[in-house]
């Protein structure tokens, strides 16, 4: 059974900086504490971009200081808030391809996990240039040849969410869809951050999901909102967990900052001593 933790939109500020009382470093510590408590048997943890709120080296240092307590092997991707050059200069062991993009692929338990760099310095929207699409096509060809299903992770959501973020999601996203379709590879799941909202659906026939991440959650956007300002909430802070075997892939959304009140166990007596399938 593959278990993959995906964290996104960590938005670490330089040390001691807090925005409107929201301490992203403290929240990230909670995320790592929950991995220790509940997911220390995961195969991999991927940080799907927007690691540093302002792309500063001090933020990457603080991020690493906190993530050293993560018991799971982890890989870092870039988002629009990051600075790829600063990061690559700072982390000499960063995941990077031969062209200097922060991307890579690993094969674990019958899945090919492709981490695609959709960030472009100075741009808020996602970009996939011809070089990155070619790299992706090569990765997909390997998956197709080995008949391994693909889990594709990128920072920017490719799909429309019917919210203002649509104007700065992945641009020319149809090029991604064409590359995926032409490859003939089995796409088991696409997952992204960036939009700070939990969604699930399909896009060009591929299963796709987004997670709300570490910093803040945005609510749905309705056209009659006052000043058209989309509401943002301090919670939940969330990471995703993909659990998959050869026939089944599930995405859980694990909230580690959450003000929902847990209902009394007595309300659900039939759940006492519950058991579930334990196939590994
Ligand atoms: Fe973000
Ligand atoms: Fe972003």
Image (spheres, rainbow, N blue to C red):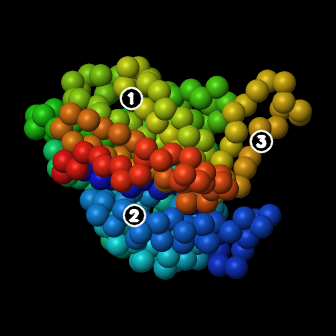
Secondary structure at badge 2 equals: helix
Return the x and y of residue 53 as percentages of the image width and height: 63, 61
Residue on which disc 1 sits: 207
Instruction: Kindly report the distance in space between the C-alpha atoms of the residues bearing marks 3 and 1.
Output: 27 Å
Left or right: residue 54 versus residue 70 is right
Q: Tell me which label, 3 or 1, sits earlier in the chain.
A: 1
Q: Which mark is residue 231?
A: 3
Residue on which disc 2 sits: 38
Q: Which mark is residue 104?
A: none
Residue 237 picture quarter: bottom right
- Residue displayed at 50% across by 76% down: 66
Left or right: residue 224 versus residue 272 is right
Secondary structure at badge 3 equals: loop
Q: Within 10 angstroms of label 3, few (less than 14), some, or many (20 or more) residues?
A: few
Say which of 271 and 53 sits in front: 271
The vertical placement of 191 against 50, above or below, is: above
Q: Nearer the viewer, mark 3 or mark 2?
A: 2
């Amino acid at each position: 059974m593959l278990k993959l933790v995906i964290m996104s939109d960590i938005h670490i500020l330089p040390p001691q900086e807090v925005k409107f009382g929201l301490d992203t470093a403290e929240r990230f510590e909670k995320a790592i504490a929950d991995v220790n408590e509940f997911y220390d048997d995961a195969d991999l943890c991927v940080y799907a971009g927007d690691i540093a709120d302002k792309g500063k080296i001090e933020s990457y240092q603080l991020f690493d200081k906190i993530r050293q307590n993560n018991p799971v092997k982890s890989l870092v991707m870039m988002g629009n808030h990051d600075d790829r050059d600063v990061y690559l200069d700072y982390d000499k062991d960063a995941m990077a391809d031969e062209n200097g993009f922060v991307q890579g692929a690993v094969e674990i338990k019958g899945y090919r996990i492709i981490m695609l760099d959709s960030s472009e310095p100075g741009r808020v929207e996602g970009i996939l240039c011809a070089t990155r699409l070619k790299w992706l096509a090569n990765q997909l060809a390997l998956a197709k040849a080995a008949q391994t299903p693909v889990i594709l992770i990128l920072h920017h959501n490719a799909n429309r969410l019917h919210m203002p973020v649509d104007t700065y999601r992945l641009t020319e996203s149809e090029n991604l869809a064409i590359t995926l379709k032409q490859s003939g590879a089995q796409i088991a799941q696409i997952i992204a951050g960036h939009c700070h909202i939990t969604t699930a659906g399909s896009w060009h026939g591929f299963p796709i999901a987004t997670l709300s991440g570490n910093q803040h959650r945005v609510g749905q956007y309705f056209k009659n909102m006052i000043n058209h300002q989309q509401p943002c909430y301090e919670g939940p802070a969330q990471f995703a967990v993909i659990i998959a075997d050869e026939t089944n892939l599930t995405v859980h959304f694990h909230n580690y900052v959450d003000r929902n009140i847990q209902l009394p166990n007595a309300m659900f007596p039939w759940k006492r001593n519950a058991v579930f399938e334990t196939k590994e």
